[in-house]
Image (cartoon, coloured by chain):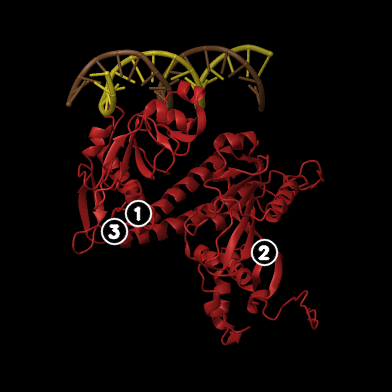
Chain colours: A red, B yellow, C brown
Amino acid sequence: MVFEPTASTITFLLLNENETLGALLQPPRDAVDVILTNPPYVTQGSSIYRREIEQISGARNGVSLDEYYDTGGLGVEALFLRYIAGALKPGRRAFIIVPLGLLNRTASRMKSNLLSECNILASIALPRNAFFNTAQPTYILALEKRRVPNQSRPPVFCGIARSIGETLDYERVPTPDDNDLMDLANLFIRYVEDGMGEVISGPTAYADTQIAKLVPADMFGKDDRWDVTRHWTDEEQVALGQRAEAVERGAFVDQVSQTFRELLTDLDSARAELDALEDGPMGTFALSDSSRFTVRSGVRIRNVDLRDHPGEVPVYSVFTRANVIKGRIDADWLREAKGVEPEEFPSVTVMATGASAVGLVHLREAGSVMTDDVVIVQPWPTEEPGVIDVDGSDTGDNRLSSLGDDGLPAHDIDLGYLAVALARTIAQGGYMYEAKLYVRRVTQLVIEVPVREDGRPDTERQVAIARVVKRIDEIRDRIDEANRWIRSSRLA
DNA sequence: TATGACGAAAGCGCGGCCAA
DNA sequence: TTGGCCGCGCTTTCGTCATA
């Protein structure tokens, strides 16, 4: 059935020329105002779509389908994302139902292609069983077609819908008083009407609700997971009453096998990439080389201090979970009582103590402080106070002007890679609670760094390795998450 | 005397067990 | 089957010793 396009606007177009590909056969280009869709998600047996596409020769709507859909990603939903991104007019939006697995895949090609054409406006988690035919967790992904390649990206509206206005069992009884999805829809409208322009540095509560947050666009990059629950702390998730619903046995099996299939694919590809990157010359660098590294400890900040002088500066201590902070301290008190400023630059930190925290390595953002049981490592020499300018004048901004494009002091060992290499050295050293890793011990450590022919650090390879390691860490988190879900599922 | 390193213990969370 | 209590061990804090 085809609705004939009117002279001015195409309202609906239903295509059925090719039984397998359907609408995919005629991808519209820069032509559509809004897309609301729940594309089919099939990963198993989806190769017939690829094969069918290869069969079609010649151009459709001015493109060769084979090339047009060659954007990476698994399954039919990846084809539809390509279709959608291409179809939108600049500045126009699409709202797409996608399975969680698609958002969390670590293969980055599909994501980077999507990001080159679109901004992510929203990522909203729907409750399990929102769709009665699948127990797969699903999301609403809101995209906006970019107008120009270097347009800045707005923060991403993240939401957790626990309810959708009807019960999640087969009866689907309306529950108008219990409808997070409606609340999120209204909040999203407000976010769009407010211009989406707010500048934020980390996940930030939105309005005064627990179910929505704004998250900086750079946390939705091609190497990031695009799900949202990771932006809610454990406590916040408990407060939201997120609790596993009963799952059908068959759906449980489907879900688990689907999840593990995805994990295996991602693991294999990460492994291959890592092997390729590490197959090259490596050099050894000692942290005791003070012309190259800074190693120092944090400051004593007690709980009483936090109670008496609350403020804005996040305080990191030796917690086992990476993102837990001890509290937020007042910057003025920090300066007066301790004589320190919040960290000017990001750093790599090593936990010096704690039975299971000892030896954990984290990346910490600038503007925070560490307690005295945290060792701070940076890949540049400790700045000398009062650097004197050539003409003998004092210098405050002299040093600042010597910072690189990334806003950091000159360095050739990437911060992210430093964290990876340190973690590896420490893991190989088998450090125990008894062998605490204070500054002196950390200073004795030695790291392996990819180098070029001339023996100097190869920054590009470092960055690439750090990126793959991050992917592997995320896969590990997903395995952990899957395991938690499997354990907590009540099977019906 | 200031700073760093470390040991020790408070106290919290979790699992196990028992009673309703 | 569920709720509550108990005890153990781990996590995290902080007092104190060592060192410059």
Of all chains, the one bearing label 2 is A
- Tag 1, which secondary structure? helix
The amino acid pointed to by label 1 is Ser
Spatial CA span between label 2 and label 3: 40 Å
Image quarter hosting the N terminus of chain A: bottom right
Residue located 31% across and 48% down the image: A418
Q: Earlier in the sequence, mark 3 or mark 1?
A: 3
Residue A256 seen in the current view: yes
Residue located 46% across and 23% down the image: A305
User: Compared to A254, does A371 lie above or below?
Assistant: above
User: Compared to A165, does A101 lie above or below?
Assistant: below
Which labelled disc corresponds to residue A354?
none
Give the crowd class for mark 3: few <14, some 14-19, many >=20 residues within 10 Å: some
Of all chains, the one bearing label 3 is A
Of all chains, the one bearing label 1 is A
Quadrant in which residue A179 is drawn: top right
Residue A335 point in image, percent of width and height: 41, 31
Are dots 2 and 3 on a single chain? yes
Q: Nearer the viewer, residue A6 or A49?
A: A6
Name the residue carrying label 2. A94
